[in-house]
Image: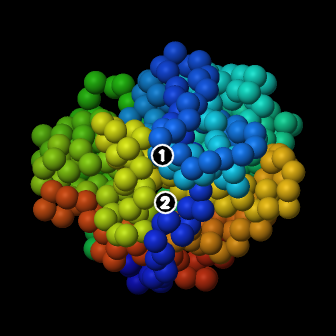
Amino acid sequence: MHRKLNLAIASVAIAVLATACSSSGGKSGGDSSGASTPASTGSSSTSAATTGADIVIGNVSPLSGAQADSNGPFLDGVKAWVGYVNDNGGISGHKIKLVTGDSKSDSTTEASQIQQIVGNDHVVAFVGNGNINPPAWINFLEGKGVPVIGGNNASISYNDSPMLFPEGSSVIGNALGLAAHNPGETKFGYLYCKEAPGCAETNASLFKGGVAKLAGTDPVFSRAVSLSQPSYTAECLAAKQAGVQTLGLGADPNTVIRIANDCAKQGFKPTYVIPGVVANDSLPSKLGSTKLLAALPDFPWFSTDPATASFRASMAKYVSGKAITESAAEGWVSGLIFQKAATTALASGGTLTSASLITALGQIKNDTFGGLTPPLSFVAGAAQPSSYCFYPAEVVNGKWTTPGGLTVTCPSASNVSALDTITAAAVKASK
């Protein structure tokens, strides 16, 4: 990383995922109409015996609309985890029932789906939501005491609400990854979507908040764009004129491709850096020789390390035919966090509740879940501390690669202090 950033590369201990997965859960469903759909259990022919009532969890993700390609696959990762758990005895003898809803990439629908699932299905938690706008519903969940574990945490709300438990890099950590990932080309620019509030929050932290400068770059250009606009030629020309060498893109995969193509037509070929939620296997082939980097909040979805074996096998078994993306990896990790907390809460006997789950989450300290996440620590009854670490990825010879396997890039202690200050200011500005 750039020496001005003084990043430390922390090698994370890797354990076989089966150790992290003491249990997992069955297939689930959701349809594009937005109706909440109860999960079905895993195959009875392979299921271990379970006892006790089902544990009911929810997931609301954009399964249709503009955010479906980037945020919809969170549900795929959760489904894979549920299938694995249920076919291996459940959590402390309890199978998982997954209830899903389609936000249709709309904030109002997202909020109504969450309210409907809480009211009708009495979920103990939401797990791995591919949510786009937590401010639209977080007050409701705070009033009900229902936590959200993992999912798309690219919102400053994850640094402000005691009901939100991030599974990886915070929105400020995401911004750091975008700016710090390409130290050789320091003129930095950012195009970000108007449709998701998290995109604007990332922009604010990069430029007004000072994250880009902290990363050792020279922030020279930013502009909001719409995912539906017909051309990005004007933005490409403006970025080119500003001297941008590295261009961060806060947009869905299809828009990333359209922007890169429009810029190439103008003779503008910067290095592109994208957040993990956008990264997938189709981008390298569609972008050709375009230099593409990604800052991932959790383990690389394409990793063949033994620690990811259960994830890959479960994706193939329980959501077969679906492309694996980084969002799916984040959904899987969200399930692992829920599983650990639920196992702890149930160890003392009784029925799992949202309150007992939150207490158990607060006992998770500096855990990497077998190398699949940055070090994570939670507290009960307060906003969660931020993680500013990320997994660097880049396309080499048409394929995604990671320089050091399952390693995370983390800022120095002094920069963590500065990032905490930036985070606090962002939380205050969001009020």
- Secondary structure beneath disc 1? loop
x%, y% of residue 250?
A: 42, 45
Q: Is residue 210 left or right of residue 64?
A: right
Q: Which residue is mark 1?
A: 46
331 left or right of 276? right
Residue 152 horizontal side relative to residue 162, left or right: left
Q: Residue at x 72, y 46 (%)?
A: 51
> Which quarter of the rendered picture does the C terminus lie within?
top right
What is the three-letter code of the residue carrying label 2?
Pro
**In this rendering, would 197 be left or right of 274?**
right
How packed mark 2 is, by other alpha carbons closer than 10 Å (few <14, some 14-19, many 20 or more), is: many
The residue at the point 65 percent across, 75 percent down is 366
Under tag 2, what secondary structure?
Answer: loop
Can the viewer see residue 24? Answer: no
Q: Residue furthest top?
A: 33
Q: Quadrant of residue 225?
A: top left
Q: Which numbered tag is attached to residue 336?
A: none
**Considering depth in this image, is 179 or 82 the residue closer to the camera?**
82
At a point 48% along the width and 46% down the height, the residue shown is 46
Tell me the quarter of the image containing the N terminus. bottom left
Q: Viewer-nearest of labels 2 and 1?
A: 1
Counting every numbered tag in the picture gives 2
| Residue to which mark 2 is pinned | 297
Say which of 77 and 292 sits in front. 77
Instruction: Name the residue located 38 percent from the left edge and 79 percent from the top edge.
Output: 2
Q: Position of residue 80 (x, y in %)?
A: 47, 45
State how far apart marks 2 and 1 are (Cα): 33 Å
Residue 387 seen in this snapshot = yes
